[in-house]
């Protein structure tokens, strides 16, 4: 089965080109779509040596979700592989993941990823604790169900991606968009898998850390965590718990001088009307408890 590959790119062109040269031998037979999300600098010249690549150049910065969505719109194959511009393929093992889609309810397969410190990650769990939806590494790296399909290294069913309207650009510029999409997939009744036999090299957060300071990143991450909860969690008890612990957390953050948390909160509040509209469209085939019990 033919696979299309979507690679969102934001600045760091030299690193991207180097990774692209490394990855191309492993992508023979694949349709490759690159989305340049930097409207200030074209990369047409840099990609002129790679005529097999289709290039989209966004006229404005859309963030990770918007860039990927733009690329996936061009995909005509049943499966699409998402890889970040800083991901290095070690081989063509991603082909092994195709067999999992023989199961009709499989939404995506997430890959194992080697970090800079040689640690292997990629299998994750989701849970609800002290009023907040949380995520963490799973305790093992065995094949099985995964909390979410990591947006930088996964294989996705294109038709199911489209049916869920892709990544929600409300999370722009980054963070939580892949967890949000995956949670909506879980709620629809789909399954997300982790396959340890598919291994890539991916040094997380190296790109984001180059362009945003820590306080800005923390503010965006907290804003998007709130957006996720307000949009997706429908269990009454969890909503009540969230309101109580959110008040406590905001008060504690104020005393500690963590004003970036308040900035994230106020930014989320400013989007509340749109969040509530999107909340109505979240599927409810599975309840929150049914999903969370999978990872308990």
Image (spheres, grey):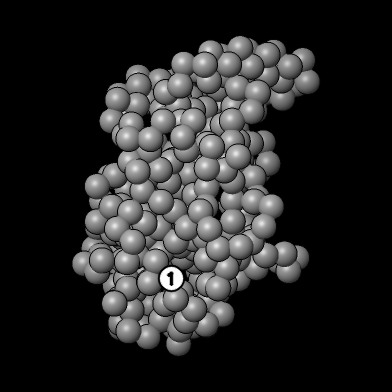
Name the residue rendered at 47%, 81% in the picture: 92
Measured as percent of width and height from the top left, residue 103 is found at: 33, 61
Name the residue rendered at 46%, 16% in the picture: 236
Quadrant where the N terminus sits is bottom left
Measured as percent of width and height from the top left, residue 244 is found at: 61, 12
Measured as percent of width and height from the top left, residue 125 is found at: 59, 46
Measured as percent of width and height from the top left, residue 251 is found at: 69, 13
Name the residue rendered at 23%, 63% in the picture: 74
Name the residue rendered at 77%, 15% in the picture: 255
Q: Nearer the viewer, residue 64 or 28?
A: 28
Q: Is residue 48 visible?
A: no
Assess disc 1: are there few (<14), some (14-19) or many (≥20) residues with their C-alpha within 10 Å of its C-alpha.
many
User: In which quadrant of the rendered view does residue 287 lie?
Assistant: top left
Disc 1 is placed on an element classified as helix
Q: Nearer the viewer, residue 228 or 47?
A: 228
As displayed, is residue 217 above or below residue 258?
below
């Amino acid at each position: 089965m033919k696979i299309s590959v979507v690679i969102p790119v934001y600045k760091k062109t030299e690193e991207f080109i180097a990774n692209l040269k490394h990855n191309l031998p492993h992508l023979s037979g694949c349709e490759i779509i690159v989305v340049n999300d930097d409207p200030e600098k074209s990369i047409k010249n840099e990609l002129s040596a790679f005529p097999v690549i289709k290039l989209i150049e966004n006229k404005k910065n859309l963030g990770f979700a918007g860039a990927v969505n733009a690329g996936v719109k061009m995909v005509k194959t049943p499966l699409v592989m998402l890889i970040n511009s800083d991901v290095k393929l070690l081989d063509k093992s991603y082909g092994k993941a195709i067999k999992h889609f023989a199961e009709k309810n499989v939404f995506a397969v997430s890959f194992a990823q080697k970090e800079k410190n040689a640690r292997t990650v990629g299998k994750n769990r989701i849970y609800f604790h002290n009023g907040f939806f949380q995520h963490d590494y799973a305790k093992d790296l065995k094949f099985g169900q995964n909390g979410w399909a990591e947006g930088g290294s996964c294989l996705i069913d294109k038709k199911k991606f489209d049916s869920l309207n892709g990544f929600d650009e409300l999370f722009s510029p980054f963070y939580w968009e892949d967890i949000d999409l995956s949670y909506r997939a879980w709620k629809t009744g789909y399954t997300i898998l982790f396959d340890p036999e598919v291994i890539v090299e991916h040094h997380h957060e190296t790109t984001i850390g180059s362009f945003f300071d820590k306080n800005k990143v923390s503010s965006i991450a907290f804003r998007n965590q709130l957006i996720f909860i307000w949009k997706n969690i429908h269990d009454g008890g969890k909503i009540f718990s969230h309101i109580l612990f959110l008040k406590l957390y905001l008060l504690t953050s104020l005393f500690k001088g963590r004003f970036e948390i308040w900035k994230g909160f106020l930014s989320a509040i400013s989007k509340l009307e749109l969040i509530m509209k999107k909340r109505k469209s979240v599927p409810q085939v599975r309840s929150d408890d049914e999903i969370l019990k999978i990872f308990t």
